Amino acid sequence: MSGKLRGTMLRLGVNIDHVATIRNARGGAHPDPVQAAQIAAAAGADGITAHLREDRRHITDADIARLMAEIDLPLNLEMAATEEMLGIALAHGPAAACIVPERRAEQTTEGGLDVLGQQPLLRPIVERLRTRGCRVSLFVEPDTEQLEACAIIGAQVVELHTGRYSLLDGEARDVELARLAAAATHAASLGLEVHAGHGLRFDNVADVAAIPEVAELNIGHFLIGEAVFIGLRAAITQMRAAMDAARA
């Protein structure tokens, strides 16, 4: 794998989890998340994101092994802060590891990681991942204290949770957007690279993409859903264009 990222442009990480969700609904090998990653690369993605959940509800261990072997883009492994997931990450050595909160009963990630309250747990995990050569990201709410805790325990990246923003409209969305922008500015001042993701769509991505401190967006569920109607390559190409236009 090259592990290279494109210059200083706003990067797009495509999350392929829900290709695997569709595959697993019936069993077998189709649709193949690795093939989806290859299409994403051809359509302009800068990286591939995959969440290996403890219950293996979508991405599997075999998927991670194949992604590492067959995709010439950086792999961002989303993972819970457990010894099992740490062992898997250390064994594979993905370009990036994003630590996320995880509950068995949740349909999707419901919020940011409590870094402030879990520093004793998270600090050694961050250290071991960094020693392995992984760029470590923590998925957090746009909260000043959480961001400062991320810097204290040695994370290189924070991914701001845009889930609340994605559910709002009107003045309430503007307030949450301002909160995201302020968090991005504060995180950058702490020396953290800033990413963002969760719930981003064609109709709401522009304002987040325009935040100058944001270096990368990670988008998955919407793109896979939109692919049902217009195809995966077209969905990624359209998202890439919307991001580039907003940043320009």
Image: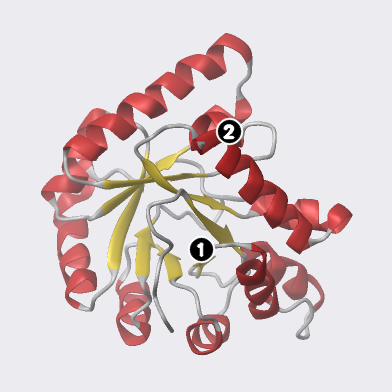
Sooner in the amino-acid sequence: mark 1 or mark 2: 1
Which part of the image, by quadrant, shows the N terminus?
bottom left
Give residue 7's quadrant in the image: bottom left
Comparing 27 with 152, the one in front is 152
Residue drawn at x 57%, y 72% as measured from the top left: 56
- Above or below, comparing residue 142 to residue 197 in the picture: above
Give residue 44's quadrant in the image: bottom right
- Above or below, comparing residue 83 to residue 168 in the picture: below
Which residue does the numbered mark 1 point to in the structure image?
A: 46
Label 2 is placed on what type of residue? Ala
- Above or below, comparing residue 175 to residue 66 in the picture: above
Instruction: State how far apart marks 1 and 2 are (Cα).
Output: 18 Å
x and y percentages locating residue 182 in the rendered image: 32, 24
x and y percentages locating residue 73 in the rendered image: 49, 74
Mark 2 surroundings: few (<14), some (14-19) or many (≥20) residues within 10 A: some
x and y percentages locating residue 80 in the rendered image: 39, 62
Question: SS for tag 2?
Answer: helix
Residue drawn at x 52%, y 16% as measured from the top left: 174
The coloring applied to the image is: secondary structure
Disc ID at residue 206: 2
